[in-house]
Amino acid sequence: MPTPPRPLPSLSVRRAAPAADAARRGLALGLLGVLLFALTFPMTRLAVGPSEAPQLPPAFVTGGRAAGAGLLSLLWLAAARAPLPPPRLWASLALSAAGTVFGFPLCIALALREAPAMHAAVVTGVLPLATAALAAWVLHQRARAGFWVCAAAGCALVLAFAVHEGGGRLSTADGWLLAAVGCAAVGYVWGARLSAEMPAEHVISWALVACLPITAPWALATWPEAPASTAAWGGFAYVTVVSMWLGFFAWYRALALGGTLRVSQVQLLQPFLALLAAVPLLGEPLRASTLAFALAVLATVAIGRRFARPAPAAVPRTPQPPQSPIPHPHEGDSP
C-alpha cells in the first residue's frame, strides 16, 4: 500500500524556522561579544592606572583607542572595498559614534582612575536594562509592564550599591559610570538600527573612520609625556583592537539578528566575567558585598528579560457563517 505524502509545513512554520535560526545565531554572537567586552574594565584600569599610581592619561586612552581602531578600520574597509554608507544613514552613524567612540570610553577612563574595576562592573551591570529600555522606545520593541518594574529595581540596586561603597553618597566616579551606561545604550541601539541595513562590521568601522579627523589630533595632543608600564600599554592595545573594534563586529550583528531587546540581556554575564578577570589582572579582592549586589542586579536583569517579550496578542476569532442544521438520520421519514 503506497505511503500517503507527508503534508507540507504551513507558511507560518516555514517563516518561523529562519527567524528562530537568526535568533539563535544572534544569542551566540551576543555571548561572543560579551566575552570580548568583559575585559574592557580591567584593561582600561591597567591602561589609566589608579590615582595613586597613574599611567596613561584618560584623555589619551579615549582618543588613542578610537584613533588606532579608526586606522585599522580604514585599512579593513579599503581591503574589503566597502561602499560608502548612503547619506540618510550618516546621522545614525554620528549618534552611534557619539555613544561608543567618544562617550563611553571617556566616561569609563575617567571613572576607572578613581574607582576599582569591580565597582565599575557592578554599577554598569544595569546596562542591559538601559539598552533594552531605549530600544523599546526608539525601535518600538514593546515590553510588558513587568520589564519596566525590573528596570526601575535594577537602577535602584545600582544606586544603592554606589551609595554603600561611597560611604553614604555618590562619588564622582559613580556619575561617570552612570553617564557611561547612557552613552553605551545610545551607541548600541543606533548601532543595531544601522546593522539592520548594512553589515555590522561596516557600522563600527565607518563610525570610527568618520571620527578620525577628531580622534587622530586628539590622540597626538594628549600623547603621554611620562613613561607608562608595559601592562598599561598592553591594556591600551586590548581596548583599541578588541573593545573598540573587533568586539562590535559580533555585538552589532547579534543585536540585529536576535533583536536588541532580547540580545542586550546577554550582557548580564558581563559584570561577573569582569569581576573574575579583575582578580588575577589587577589583584582586586572580591568582597562579599560586591558579589551580593552583583547577584541582585543579575537577578533583576534575568527577571526583566522574561518580560522583555511583548505579551502575545489575542488572535481574533473569525466569525463562522451560520450552518444549516444537520437532520437526524430518520428525520423526515414517515413513521
Image (cartoon, rainbow, N blue to C red):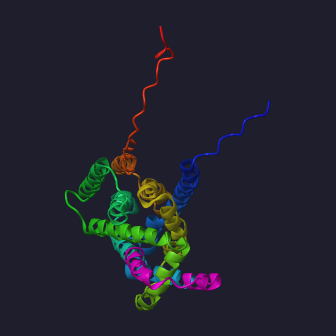
Q: Is residue 321 magenta?
A: no
Residue furthest out toward the right: 1
Q: Which quarter of the picture shows residue 7?
A: top right
For the record, the magenta segment spans 73-100
Identify the image quadrant of the N terminus.
Answer: top right
In-front residue for pair 81/303:
81
Q: Position of residue 90 (x, y in %)?
A: 43, 82
Compared across the picture, whether 124 is left or right of 230 comes to left
Query: Residue 281, percent across and down?
Result: 50, 62
Q: Residue furthest left?
A: 168
Task: State how many labels appear.
Answer: 0
Q: Quadrant of residue 178?
A: bottom left
Left or right, residue 289 beside residue 80: left
Q: Considering only vertical position in the picture, is 274 above or below 252? A: above
The secondary structure that most of the magenta stretch takes on is: helix
- Name the residue located 45 percent from the left edge and 65 percent from the top edge: 42
User: Measuring 49% from the left and 76% from the top, which residue is drawn there?
Assistant: 204
**Residue 198 x/y as whole percent:** 52, 74
Report if residue 77 is visible in the image: yes
